[in-house]
Image (spheres, rainbow, N blue to C red):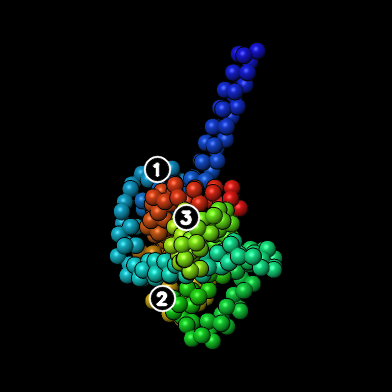
Amino acid sequence: MMNQRRINDILRRVLFYFLVFVIAVYALFPFYWAFSTSFKTENEMFRRATYLPQEPTLKNYEYVLRDNTFLVALRNSAFVAGATSVLSLMIGSFAAYALGRLRFRGRTALLYIVLSMTMFPAISILSGLYSIVRELGVFGTPFALILTYPVFTLPFTVWVLTSFFKGLPAEIEQAAIVDGATPFQRFRLVLLPLIAPALVTTGLLAFVSSWNEYLFALNFTITNPEYQTVPVAIAQFSGIDALQEPIAEIMAAAMVVTIPLVLLVLIFQKRIVAGLTAGAVKG
């Protein structure tokens, strides 16, 4: 009986790790294929499909890193994504504090309304946002993106941070009140440091979402190519040679854009996991 149970445990464990392996291969293979393709020459890429570059070259990366348009787009993306993350955290933390710690009528309904904003496809609100940025006079500038990207970064930020604020013990804030702290002091000095994992999680995810966004970036900077972000710049690559399909160059640019994000996730992975799991438990 014990042997049979032990065999069953081993089989379940083997099946579990096999499924993990299959999922990992399924998720990581596109990234590997893009990385491998970025080192291939045009002739090799169209001659036959290979899992490893037979004639590895750095020419694609040299083209990308010497392309001034791409470097400017990289700077624009860093500025827009960073500013959007800061703006989302500033506004989202105040909203989450009100929804998570204050008691007022309609609070739950308001929270679900905020969450429902993520259900609208970006294309459905594009025309309205287009009119807004034209009226504000920021069309064709990075500020058009900074003002519109919170439309899809704020709902997630508010939702996650609200669950954290709800989970904080009331005694902590009560002790601060006894010590004479003002509402803003309680928020800034007491509560915000306690939700640092959530701030890192939501800030990084907002950064990644803004960094990868294409539709708004294409439409709101179409008149000023010098303000275009990386996804738009990559889509408009013309290649090293004339009449060329710049697949390898696009893959090299994608690696240059993706690797910093991967490094950020690896650096902050503990805080990201802590933020997501703690929010799920406390919410």
Q: Amino acid at mark 3?
A: Leu
Q: Position of residue 198 (x, y in %)?
A: 49, 55
Instruction: Compute the Cα span from label 3 to label 1.
Output: 47 Å
Q: Secondary structure at mark 2?
A: helix
- Any part of residue 175 in sight: yes
Above or below: residue 222 compared with residue 248? below
Residue corresponding to mark 3: 194
The Cα atoms of the two marked residues, 2 and 3, are separated by 37 Å
Q: Who comes first in sequence, dot 2 or dot 1?
A: 1
The local secondary structure at tag 3 comes to: helix
Residue 168 placement (x, y as % from top left): 54, 54
Q: Is residue 200 visible?
A: no
233 left or right of 150?
A: left
Residue found at x 49% / y 45%: 29
Q: Nearer the viewer, residue 108 or 252?
A: 108
Residue linked to disc 1: 52
Which residue position holds label 2? Answer: 227
Which residue type carries mark 2? Answer: Tyr
